[in-house]
Amino acid sequence: MTHHPLAPAWLNAPDDANDLAPGVWSDSVARNDAGVLCVGGVSVTDLARDFGTPLYVIDEATARDRASSIRAVFSEAFAAIGTDVSVYYASKAFLSTEVARWMVAAGLRIDVASGGELAVALAAGVSGENIGLHGNNKSLAEIERAVAARVGTIVLDSAVEVERVAAVASAAGVVQRVRLRVNSGVHAHTHEFLATAHEDQKFGTSITQAPAIVAVIRSHASLDFVGLHCHIGSQIFDSGGFVESAKRLLGLHAELLAGGPVAELNLGGGFGIAYTSVDRPTDIAVIAAEMARVVGETCRDLGVAVPHICIEPGRAVIGTAGLTLYTVGTTKTVTVDVAGGSAERLYVSVDGGMSDNARPALYGSDYAVRIASRESSAAPVLVRVAGKHCESGDILVNADYLPGDVAVDDVLAVPATGAYCFSLASNYNYLARPAVVAVVDGQARVIVRGETEHDLLARDAGIERTPA
């Protein structure tokens, strides 16, 4: 098929618009004999009937397997250089009490970035020692709660937080373990990374400022400085940025050893996943091996012992485990002027939108889509999947191909929505946020209840007042 003039350069028309791109969908997704998509042994038509759409669906086995696999490959890679690894699940990607329990069962700890995330982790029964607290502006109440819960590590983001956490820990009569977040000057995304002397961002402190701040941390009897932390970006496809950042951090790590022990080094997260058929993230085992090799070589060159290593994957654990189901409400063909003539795009509008997946509107993120409730022999046509919000930018899938007979009441599935979709969901246009359903072994269960209009109206204090 000739490349469609309205399609992005990377997107090629498939021979079969029913095909499921490898690596994009969760491990259990497949079509049954009737052509209906199934996940975790449950058909999407059953899910849509029983729970409605839009609907977030999490393949529980995939999420658990990814968590265990990441822990295993990093542990193996760093054991080869004589150290061990703590893996923290970056819960900002997706957090519920059940998911927190899955992560702990897989041997992971939980990284939280707010009082609310901390509350969920604690409600899930996660012990304080297995939680790390992040954030560039932790409130006094959040710090007090973290210290009271005996959170294993608080990541200090500024000199101001040093004094704040020290005072809370002192008042509680405890010694609080802390890391210092440092900007390595490396910023990475997908295939490229940029290395500079400084980064212009709200998180952390520069490498040049860090020694003075660490000295202040060590001056407080209520604080135990355990090491540095760095996060270089998100959706990273290869090891180059991680390698360069680790080299820089280890130079600072070696310098700080002159003033006392530095037991750990947290290299952060940001490992990428495939969202479309053309995405090719490096296998995480390859990234782990390369990171371990460089850490080992750099420590040897610096003449220091290899520290305990920490990492913080989120998207890489939960992203591919999720998909979102929608029901088609309307379709319309739009004619667009192009060089030498015109071309047509089919708009397919569904019952959700930017309120359940803000990433395309926020970041221009690309997603894939397939008809999930049936197969079709119709020729592929270029589509744009739009939401129902009163915004021209309310686009869920900018460009993909669906069978040309896509129609009202078809159920569509958008893969790789496990990370940062539920987390970023809103009530824009007063849409209720969807439920989250976990599927495994042919069974489906709600792990986060969907909202109702009653839930939305319950917060409106004006309803309780008598009109004038």
Image (tube, helix red, strand yellow):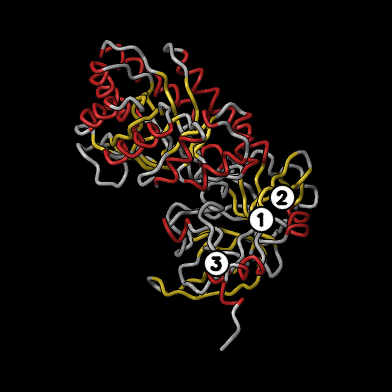
- In the rendered image, residue 215, in percent from the top left (x then y), is placed at 24, 26
Number of residues whose C-alpha sits closer than 10 Å to that of mark 3, classed few (under 14), some (14–19) or many (20 or more): many
- Residue located at (49% from left, 35% from top): 148
In the picture as drawn, the residue positioned furthest to the bottom comes out as: 468
Residue carrying label 3: 386
Q: Quadrant of the N terminus?
A: bottom right
Q: Which mark is residue 446?
A: 2
Q: Is residue 193 visible?
A: no
Mark 3 element type:
strand
Q: Which mark is residue 281?
A: none
Distance between the alpha carbons at the discs numbered 2 and 3: 26 Å
Residue carrying label 1: 435
Which comes before the other along the chain, label 1 or label 3? 3
Does 306 sit left or right of 260 as displayed?
A: right
- Label 3 sits on what residue type? Ala
Distance between the alpha carbons at the discs numbered 1 and 3: 20 Å
Front position in the image: 247 or 334: 247
